[in-house]
Image: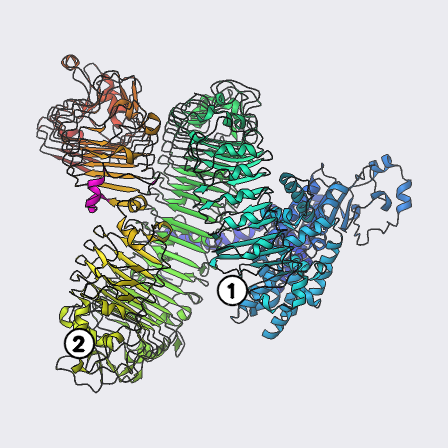
Amino acid sequence: MSIDPAIPAASFAWDVLKWVVVPVKRQFGYVISSKSYAQDLQKEVGKLTYEAERIHNAVEVARNNIRTVYSLVTDWHESAEKALKEARELLEEFEKASKSCCYGTLPDPNCRYQFSRKAKDKIELLQRLARECSEFRDISSIDPAPGNVTVVSAPSAKDDGVFESRASIKRKIMAALADNRNSVVGVYGMGGIGKSTLLEEVERRIREESDIKKEENVSLRAKLLHERLEDEERTKQENDEERQKKKKKVLIILDNLWEPLDLKSVGIPCGHDNKVIGCKLLLTSRYRDVLQAEMGCDDPLLLGELQEEEARRLFESYVGDKVRDEEFKPLVEEALHKCAGLPFLIVQMAKLLKHANLSGWKNVLKQLKLSKNEGIGEKVNKMLQLSYDHLKGEDVKSLLRLCVVCGVSKPSLENLVRYGVGLGLFREDKSMEEARESLASSIRTLQDSSLLLEDRDVHGFKIHDLVREFVASVASRDNPFLVLKEKDRLITEWSKDELKSCRATCFPYVDMEELPEEIDCPEMQMFLLFRNNKPLDVPDSYFNSMRKLAVLNLTGIHLIHSPLSFQLLENLHTLCLDDCSVDDVASLGNLKGLQILSFANSEIPLLPKEIGQLVELRLLDLNHCSRLQVIKPGVLGSLIKLEELYVENSFDQWNAMEQTPPSNACLIELNNMKNLYSLHVSIPDPNVLPKDLNLEKLTKYRIQIGKTWHSSSEYKTSTALKLKLNPANDILHKGCVRTILDKTDDLYLDGLNKPQSICELSLESFPKLKHLHVENGPSVHYILQCPSSTAFKRLESLVLEDLINMEKICHSHVLSTSFRTLKKVRVKLCFKMEVLFPCSLLRELPQLEEIGVIECDLMREIGEADEGGKVELRNLRALELRDLPSMKNFLSAGSAPLSSSSETQAATQAVFFNGQQVSIPSLQTLTMYGLPNLETLWSEESAVELSNLQSLELLGCKSLSKVFNFRSLVNSHKLHSLTIKNCVSVQEVFDLDGPSASGNVETPSELTTLELWDLPSLRCLWNKNPCGLVRFHRLTKLKVIDCDSLRFLFLASMVKPLAQLKELEVMYCKKMEAIIMEEEGLETETSGILAFPMLTYLRLALESLTCFSRKKCSREARYRDHVKSRATALFNHEVAFPRLETLEIWNMDNIEMIWDNQAAADSFHNVKSLDVRACNKLVNIVPSCIVGRLWSLERLRVSYCGSLEVVFELQSLNPLDGNPGVRSQLKRLMLYELPQLKCVWDKELHHQVKFQCLHSVTVSNCKSLTSLFPASVATDLIQLEELEINACGITELIGMEGPVLGVVFPKLNSLKLKHLTELKCIYTGTHALGWPALKTLEVHGCNKVEILASQIENETPLQKQPLFLLEKGAFPNLQELRLDLSGHMEIWHGDFYCEEFFRTLRVLELCHLSEEYAISMCLFIQSLTNLEKLVLCESHLEKLSRNVEAIEDPSHELLPSSRYFQHLKTLDVSHCDGLSSMFTPTMAKNLTELIELRIRNCKMLKEVISDDGGKEGYAVTFNQLKHIQLDGLTRLSCFSSSEYTLVFPLLEDVIVSGCPNMQSFSKGPIVAPKLERIQVETQADPKPQHEVWFWKENLNTTIQNMFEEMATIARVKFMWLSEFPELIGKWHSELNPIKSSWQLERLAVDNCPSFINAIPSKLMLVLEKMTRLQVCNCESLEEIFDLEGLEPMEITRVLPQLRNLGLVNLPKLRQLWNKDLQGTMRFSSLFSLTLYNCSNLRYAFTPSMARCLANLHGIEIKECGEMEEVIAEEEGHISVVEKITFPMLYTMTLECLPNLTSFLSGKSHMLDCPRLIVLTIAHCPKMRSLTWHSWMQIDQDTPSLFTPQVQFPTLKSIVLSHMDKLSKIWTCGPQGTFTFKYLQKVKARNCKNLEILFPHWVATSLSQLEELRVESCGLEEIVWSASGDDSQHSIAAQFLFPVLTSLVLHDMPQLKSFCPNLLTLNWPFLKELRVTHCEKMNMLSFPATMR
């Protein structure tokens, strides 16, 4: 070894010394550190002992569940036990040696040396074993026992291996046994559900884990309940007290109790009530009553069926991979359905099916049809027979049979009671209410016996499929019935004997075409038939034999007339015609014995007087009969025995009592119904309520009074009252309402105007009220004003919305009885509320479960502070806080304990949840949206209990910087969903710094979903290396979107715990370079490949991403030069994706390759869908190195990749991934917007990869692509079905690589070629191609295609090549041909051979057909002998008939014109502007097969059938025509101008829309026997559900009277008045509306020069559905609304839904209405108001009218030259209104108003806009202020734009422009509550006299100002301070506008400084700074970084 002389000798000597000393030191260390080694070894022994015991317990669990434990686990356990044994022996030897050497006083160096060496090795061994244990994911394979279902699971949980439905019930059992209050624990469920197996598992668990030891536990398996205990005599003789003292804990398990057990008889100590003493009982039974009523179990647990997924996994665990076979899949579903979640049945069936073939499966499934009593069916039959036989009472069995007859698994409770009454299941003297109670009791009995199952609904239940089949086949032998299913035989196939004995029949939605004429069923008592509203003719004689029929239900049937046999049904008691169309209701009046009659959801026009003959009727259901307009007077009054009446969302045209003669029913008729107790009714007009209406007798009701559009209540209460109030009707003081108000459960009040307190409405303070909803009540200040012992003592939910003056829920102290039952409170749009509850009241809400506070701007906190101590909300489960700009804390900080230090209090003031103040242990859902002042959720010092928090959503919390600290993270271990959006200050989600952040705490363990959106400051998910602290073991879904500061997502050490991650989406994070990364200082060594084993969905859209994982890049980058080039591949060898199915890569310009040649070997084999978008550096998608792995790829989509040249590329000739050839599974290929794409398949690649599965190809906007398919690829595409190419540079479809012969695409059925400007042919070869399967061909915009098709032998002109070169039979199946002929394309070259080419064509669509080619087109059509549909659009034809006549010359030997269209069924002509008429009568009569005729938007068309001068009496018959549509034909005067008779035998639908000049349909007679109505379809809303129909006498009369009768206008929904010139003349005079309510929703009164007003008074009341009114271009119009002649009551009802009012170009408009309103007219729905160019209008409205605009969101007033004020006093009136409030106003725009001086007139007025966000004032040169000022005031002091009389507390944007007289915007000093703290944008321009922009007091309050722009103003400084004001020296002054991002100052020559005396400015977020043409500006105040 040579030594550098430059190295000092001392250094060399030290190196030599190290070689000698270090080994000696190491050996000596073994001696001196022996105790340390002993301690470390002891610690590792403890850790491994714990792991070994855990694995041992898990193994026992698995074996008890009949699972096979993996040998790897058992081997590990043996090794661990051996190592532990040796380690313990080593420790014992060391301990002995230490004591034996000199009696322990001196150490033995040799002994310690040897021990330390061995201990070191043992420690390493134990640590290795512990690591191996932690890597166990599965310890066993599934082999479960019946009832105790197991799954593969990690061994960490106590319920390992058990499905959740079983694990949860076990946990409940264990908890109940641990509760000393429970002496008896019971489980019940139907047979075969797994009760016995469950008890065995519970017993084992108890032995292992409970404090009841094996020797202390007595377990009695009582299969035979009469068996006595062997020690019975000894037990009876013992002294009970002594025995209790001596004995240990005893648990007795009794399984399968069929009947009550006398505990004394079997020696179990019990009291006189059979209550067990001194031990605990664990019992199971099929009957809940046995456990609850007889055995003393307070709350038995129901063991239900397995969940669907659990049942599937159990079944598959036995049957194996066969279930994935496509052939077996339908049978698997059928088997699981039949097993219905029963573990016993699933296991039995699976064992039989495991080795069976397909036919064997089918045979086994048939065994479950229990009528055969064999196999599995016999076992199930025996179980159910025992349960059925134990039922007590024939009525209960009858009910069970009735449930089965209903034919569904969840029979309707309502139907059952109606059927039961009809069948006489209840005593005749029972009322309907008593019958319901009896039915509920019987259902509970059946549920207790497990023959009926409980459902999630409160009163819901369901019947097991096995029980249904059992009852149908076995239990109903004496009472036979028939339930048909879709696959069963028809009723006509049943034997006569079966039908004769049949007592009940059900057809549950079986698709039957017809019913037999008659069936012989003399015993039939019940007949049920359900259909989906399809016509079904019920023969007149069908029910002839059913004289005993008591119940008849015909649901969903179009019943044209009632069958005559109805008259024979004298015993019929229940008739249900629900969801039916019933034309003949009157005939039902003969069914005198009816007790139940239902028309629910049916279309019936009226209830005739004959129904009044049904005097035995007890229930009448008319709910949701939307077409029911008439109930004949006296009908309801005749039904004196009626007990239940349902008319909800149905008939509401009630007559007032004083109306004579009455035309409809009157509510007073209800007084005749002495037994009426249940009423559902809607009463939109409160004025029809009789004074003496008796509602006091009602016990159940849902009554709606007034026009309210609120949705139905979510609460299922027995009494509900919904009131829509207004000042004109005093509903609340009507006697009938007062009688039910205090006994109402659910109360909804809308529009309450008085009193101030809700409680004042009730004399008894609503003692029974459970649900209260108050909305839109400006008078309401409080809910409860004075304490009351009865007020709201049962209230469960409280909803307050849009109460603009609401201050508090309670005005003063509340007694403890009020609100104690409150569970839900929701407050929205209550702008004056600052606190939800005082803390004293919060403490008295023990049942509160849900709080919601939304859009309450002043709300500061939920609870107001007091000295009462901590608030405990133990049941609060959901908290929703949205859009609360003032809220900072849940409780105000003043309620913190007095003992807290000032520092602690200061720290907790910024904490939202302070654990010292509030406890919310049950909180599950927390939603916080739009809380800009929220800074900290919780802190370490004052943590709250979050142990049940499951979902957390944070959105728009701008001040929040972190979400979880360590303590809150540990507390929220049940959190499963976390969403954070638009929280701009959040820097990390998990803050793990702190004194507690140590140890190996795994949390959050339950998190499954994590979503992070729009978090620009987020730097990391956690702020330090987690080291096991944060482990997402259950995370399945992760979304990270728009997090621009995030550089990476995971550290490598974090990947392994993400074993369950299934969906990963990372998008638009601008700085993210990699998903996985290690940085210096945070490096964690990871060996091997990182994997996402469960990931199936991955979406990445990251512009800076270079690779998915850079785990090793940071190290390699220091040594290798090629790292940079490698990083351009997205996926490399570092990360594996073994189960990935969907991969989406978007907007990633930094990657040049998706895969490199070293991608992980086990990755991408399962990828089925690949989507690549906007990756502009990619030149290929699938290189050769990855082709072999993508064999599962089925869908490939590539779009917007600017550099892509080839999709599939072969870079070398090496075999692909080790495979000589690949058969791709690709089925769908989509390529869009790829400008550089040269080819799809590399020429070498397609030889090795076959694409024989491809069935759909779509290519669009690939301009460089000249050919799509190489010839060799084309010949492989034998499955291709769809091909669409759009806007590409393709010249030929198939490239000239080699010869292409015959058929290329044998299965292609759709070919669409669009906008291929270079395309000339499919294939340049000379061989004709066949298209055997082609059905649809479209060619559009292919301008170079001059000939569509030609035969191969036809000679084509030079330079012309047909697109298709064909041979005979080339298109044998072509059905649809769509051609764009704009490029003068010739359809066919040569002679036509119709029999050989287009013989199957059914549909022909031609666009841009010119007159030049019209004749050749007709020749082509002539050859299409089977043409059914012809569509012509955008073609310039003058007359269709002229072209036909031109070729009818006999010399041409053509077929006569009658044969041209003989098969035509549909003719559709649109946008053919040259047409003036369609047909001559001669041509029209030959359209013999025409079914549908549509003519649309042909502007010149005047008539469809022209007049050829024929004689009167001639008939033109359209034999098959059913539908005619005439739309947008503005010049059409009639359909036929000839006097011929038009005959339409089948015509059913006629649509006439946009034909304003149509005066009649035909000048001749019309015969249309089936036509009953005309559809008036509007352009605005042509959806089927909005169709409106009209009819009067006949078709001609209907058209002729459209204007006279106003039917069209009454039914139309959108209308421009100018399109109806005749209507304009009748608008004010002759027009008399015949309908009480029009359908008109949008009306434009335009171009009506003679109108003085827009809406006459007689139309005001019928426009109740109008939402938008636009009045424009009416030069004489002076007012909008003519109210003369309307009573004050009527004025309150006009235009109730008007939302948008626009007034444009009305030069003489003086006012909106012509009558003094004084607040009577209410525009409560008006949303926006626009006034434009109304030059004569001096003001918009008066103060009294402004008060009625409570919902106004936007005001826009422009170019109204005479307007002086927006709100002005009317002449001669002095308004008493002092404060004008627009509670919902968001935007206000005032522009080009040269005379506007102020917004308000009158010195007494104030303006309050609590939600105004945007204010724009421009070109208002006279405006100084928003409020009025006298000239004296102006002379004394310059007024400011904003004054204390103007309140805009939420204003965010101000734009002021060209305001010549504006001198200042704000007052010079602060005044009152004048605030603008939310202001974000200020713009001032061309305000030459503006002296002051910001007073200092304003500037310092603008903490949220982001944009400031000032141009061309006379300012000297931006921020102004008064003389003597030293506030500019304060610290706060240095932080003016702290979040300012943009500052623009331009053209202000007088501007000197930004803020005087302020030397520096600090704007850390400033992005834009522009100061131009401000010569005097001192720029030194701006930091250098800004200048």
Nearer-the-camera pick, 1009 or 1786? 1786
Rendered view: 1507 above or below 1631 = below
Q: Quadrant of the C terminus?
A: top left
Nearer-the-camera pick, 807 or 734? 734
Asked if disc 1 and disc 2 are in contact, CB closer than 8 Å, the reply is: no
- The residue tagged with tag 2: helix, strand or loop? loop
Q: Quadrant of residue 1773?
A: top left
Left or right: where does residue 1066 sit relative to residue 1377? right
Q: Can you tell which mark lies on residue 514?
A: 1
Question: x%, y% of residue 304?
Answer: 64, 51
> Label 1, label 2: how many angstroms apart (C-alpha)?
49 Å
Q: Which residue is mark 2?
A: 1447
Q: Which residues are magenta?
A: 1616-1639
Nearer-the-camera pick, 1383 or 1930? 1383
Q: Quadrant of the N terminus?
A: bottom left
Instruction: Give the crowd class for mark 2: few <14, some 14-19, many >=20 residues within 10 Å.
Output: some
Rendered view: 323 above or below 1534 = below
The magenta stretch spans residue 336: no
Q: Quadrant of residue 1253?
A: bottom left
Question: x%, y% of residue 1595?
Answer: 31, 55
Q: Is residue 3 visible?
A: no
Amino acid type, callout 1: Glu
